[in-house]
Image (spheres, rainbow, N blue to C red):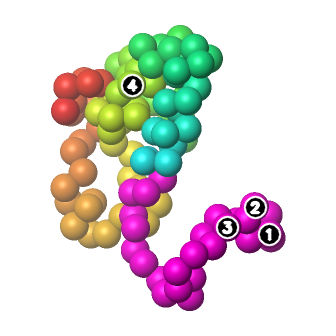
Amino acid sequence: MAVHGDQVISAFGDTAHKVNVRSVRKSLLSALYGILIAEGRINPASTLAELGVDDQPGLKEGENGATVRDLLMARSGIYHPAAYETPDMRRKRPARGSHAPGSF
């Protein structure tokens, strides 16, 4: 189901059936970024520092060296808590600063 505001734009299947899809947003965002990269509007080699991007809580030293490509590949080295992480996810999350961008 796709919704914009309070309007259903497209729907198929049993939309009342709940499915835990977790990381689907990364795939969708990667596809959208792919369009912008193909059009030359975004450089995947640009770093967060070059783009003036920060986060909450702020990025630590070295984290701002992550590139758009690193972010899209989930290899940024930035390990903030997830909004709805489980205790198991929390235990498995690497410590902040433990991996350089693009290395893990």
In primary-sequence order, the first of circles 3 and 2 is 2
Give neighbour class at mark 1: few <14, some 14-19, many 20+ (Cα, 10 Å).
few
Q: Secondary structure at mark 4?
A: helix
The mark found on residue 7 in the picture is: 1
The mark found on residue 69 in the picture is: 4
Image x and y of residue 99, in percent: 21, 30
Q: Secondary structure at mark 2?
A: strand
User: Which is more toward the observer, 52 or 95?
Assistant: 52
Relative vertical location of residue 65 with respect to residue 84 in this rendering, above or below: above
- From the viewer's perspective, is the residue at label 4 or at label 1 nearer? 1
- From the viewer's perspective, is the residue at label 3 or at label 2 nearer? 3
Q: Quadrant of the C terminus?
A: top left
Left or right: 79, with 44 as reference point: left
Give neighbour class at mark 3: few <14, some 14-19, many 20+ (Cα, 10 Å).
few
In primary-sequence order, the first of circles 4 and 1 is 1
Look at label 2 and name its amino acid.
His
Q: Which residue is mark 3?
A: 10
**What span is colored magenta in the figure?**
1-25
Look at label 3 and name its amino acid.
Ser
Callout 1 touching callout 3 (CB < 8 Å): no
Q: What is the quadrant of residue 91 in the picture?
A: bottom left
Q: Which residue is mark 2?
A: 4
